[in-house]
Each structure stands twice: as C-alpha cells, then as structure tokens.
Image: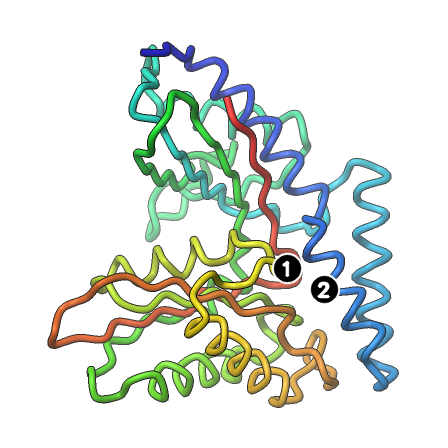
Amino acid sequence: MRIIAPERISDAVARLFIDANVRLPPDIRAAVGRALENEPWRPARRVLETIDENADEAEARGIPICQDTGMACVFLEIGYDAHIGGDVYEAVNSGVARGCAEGYLRASIVRDPLRRENTGDNTPAAVYIELVPGDNIKITVAPKGFGSENMSRVKMLRPSDGARGVIDFVVSAVEDAGGSACPPVVVGVGVGGSFDKAALLAKRALLRPLDEPNPDPYYAELECELLEKLNALGTGPMGFGGKTTALGVSVLSAPTHIAGLPAAVNISCHVTRHATEIV
C-alpha cells in the first residue's frame, strides 16, 4: 500500500489547470497545421492562421488560450494499492482554486444552476474516478469551455437505428452547432451504456489524442466516416465556410441493454485542452 498525501494531488491539479489553459496539446496543434495546409478558402485560412498565432502567443506569454478557461473536469485513475491520506475531492478543489488564482484564470462556476452565485474560484470541479491496477494516481485536468459544451447532445436511439442512426445524430448535432461551437471542433462520441454513461463516454473520448487511432478497427472506420461527413458540411473555421469543420472524431463504446442504443455527442471547440500528470 502506497500512501499519497492530498497535498500532492492539489499541487498537481493546480499545475495542470494552468498548463492546460496555456498550452494546446501537440496533437491539436498538428491538426490545426494540417487543416491550414489543406484549406484553399482564404477566410478559413485566415481564421486558422489566427488560431495558430493565438496558441503561440498564449504559450509564449503564459496566458490563457481563451477567455473561457472552462469548467475543470478532473479525471483520476487511482491505483488499487494507492491510499489517499485525506479527502480527494477537497484536494482536487483546493488545486483548482489555487490554479485559478495563480494562473489568473476566469472564475466561471456558479454555486447553484438557477440562483447563479459565482463561487469566485472555479470550484467545485467535475471529478471522475476510476480504479485501476497499481499504486499511482493518474490525474488529467480537462478544462471545458461552455460555448461548445452547450452544443452537446444525448439521444436515446432505438437498436434498429444502428450505426446509421448514430452517424445521422452526430452529423445533425454538429450541423446544428454551426459556428456557435467555435469550429473547427473536436467531437467526442459515446455509444452504449445508459443515458448518463453515454455522456461520460463522449467526454472521455475527447481525451484521446487525435493522432492515436481507435484500437477497434470497426470504430476507427466509423470515426473516419464521421470526420468526412462533418467536414463536408462546409461550416468551416468559426463558421466562415471551408473544408475543416472538425479536426477529429473520437468514439468510445460500452455494453448496453438489449432495448436501447444511447448515444451522446460532446462537442469541443478548437481549444480542446487537457494535461496529465502521474503522482
């Protein structure tokens, strides 16, 4: 049994929250670069150039890539043989609050969804815990902006709808989002499980690097088909038209009930941020 002090979790979360807001992951930067190389439409090219310049400036100056520094979604993969010497949720939220202050990140969280009082420090985070082999804790902080989050969807399809129903649902969601989700977008798709599980799968799908193919050939092919159809929409960067509406599509699936086919689409803008550390 390995004992991990909660302060180590707090310190890591604070660092990751700042880092994720300042630096785009390499796979996202590379995807923007490829889109720029392949985009003949001048307004779209200019948007992609601005996205690239903005990312460079944010990293060089240590300032947020976007003014919406997101809701802190924190994924913890906790080893069976790891013991946390305190409240893990308190540790995570302490780290988020510190990262918000030290990184000069916008406070975007309200304490109650209807009364709308801002907590002032971006807490509480959305925390997701998974138990895995080992004695370490893998921490991934994924700040999620709500311009794109608001465009996300969950739908309870019928089993008879099959793959075609999932494809139509995903394409419709991205088409309806238009320029409001700050395209080019990254699209996480969850298929299976229950109503709530499908949504979590879609959010987790956004963590997979775009240059890492789906390990299941069936879903790898489905992702390629979806990406082709999304880019054929012609929405383009920031809705100005062009060849790149989506930078990538990632699908996660789970077992489900014989009577259902839950599907979820979690849309993320071009600022698809996440940073990981193992403690």
Tell me the kind of residue under disc 2.
Ala
Mark identifier at residue 211: 1
Q: Position of residue 273 (x, y in %)?
A: 61, 49
Quadrant location, the N terminus: top left
Per the image, label 2 sits on a secondary structure element best described as helix
Q: Residue at x 29, y 85 (%)?
A: 162
Looking at the rendered image, the disc whose residue lies closer to the viewer, 1 or 2, is 1
Decide: is 183 above or below 56: below
| Residue visible at 41% across and 42% down in the picture | 117
Tags 1 and 2 touching, CB below 8 Å: yes
Label 2 CA crowd tier, 10 Å (few <14, some 14–19, many 20+): some
For mark 1, give the secondary structure.
loop
Of the two numbered discs 1 and 2 on the same chain, state the one appearing first in sequence. 2
Image coordinates of residue 190 in percent, x first then y, are 36, 65
How are the residues colored? rainbow
Residue at image coords 41%, 87%: 168
Residues 7 and 36: in front is 36
267 on left or right of 42: left
Residue 31 numbered mark, or none: 2
Estimate the x, y position of residue 46 in percent, counting from the top left.
86, 73
Report the number of numbered marks: 2
Say whether residue 274 is left or right of residue 149: right
